[in-house]
Amino acid sequence: MTHSLVCPETVSRVSSVLNRNTRQFGKKHLFDQDEETCWNSDQGPSQWVILEFPQRICVSQLQIQFQGGFSCHQGRLEGSQGSEAFGKIVEFYPEDNNSLQTFPVPAAEVDRLKVTFENTTDFFGRVVIYHLRVLGEKKV
């Protein structure tokens, strides 16, 4: 059964936060299920989110809700096990809108994921995300 894999023990890191204002735009807002909060990156050529899970997972879907005008034309999902280097799992191509978008992921067993947002729609390279969900199964 597929369910959300991000839990309180999942460690997350992001490439940047707008004006370093983590209280208003920090990474915690990616997972808080609040429609009023978001992660807002600072400007730059590409932005990313890294997730380190407390156990091995098998990813099947990635769900992202951008703010229209602050998404990307191309994204890349990479994964690794332990201290291995990240390897590409899949590329995805979001639409520039406010809808929750679902991207299928070929089955991959990992304990770390990196989601990279490239070719952003904002002139300055900022990305705004209201929800980021990783769906799949926990491995025993």
Image (spheres, grey):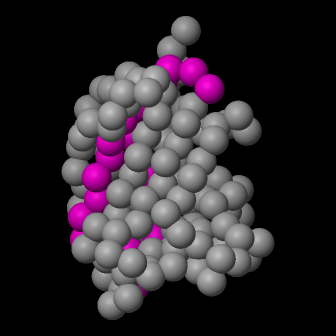
Residue at 33% over, 90% down = 123
135 to 41, vertically: above or below: above
Residue 89 coordinates in the image, percent (x, y): 26, 38
| Residue nearest the observer in this picture, 73 or 96 | 73
Residue 53 coordinates in the image, percent (x, y): 57, 31
Residue lying at the far right of the rendered structure: 23
Q: Is residue 76 magenta?
A: yes
Residue at 39% over, 52% down = 115
Q: Is residue 91 magenta?
A: no
20 to 88, vertically: above or below: below
32 to 120, vertically: above or below: above
Q: Is residue 19 left or right of residue 64?
A: right
| Residue nearest the observer in this picture, 83 or 111 | 83
Image quadrant containing the C terminus? top right
| Residue nearest the observer in this picture, 82 or 63 | 82
Q: Is residue 109 left or right of residue 55?
A: left
114 to 66, vertically: above or below: above
Residue lying at the far top of the rendered structure: 140
Residue 119 coordinates in the image, percent (x, y): 25, 73
Q: Secondary structure of the magenta portion, mostly?
A: strand
| Residue nearest the observer in this picture, 89 or 101 | 89
Residue 4 visible to the viewer: no
Residue at 53% over, 43% down = 51
Residue 16 coordinates in the image, percent (x, y): 53, 69
- Quarter of image, res 78: top left
Magenta range: 54-79
Residue at 64% over, 53% down = 31
How many numbered discs sit on the rendered protein? 0
Residue 13 visible to the viewer: yes
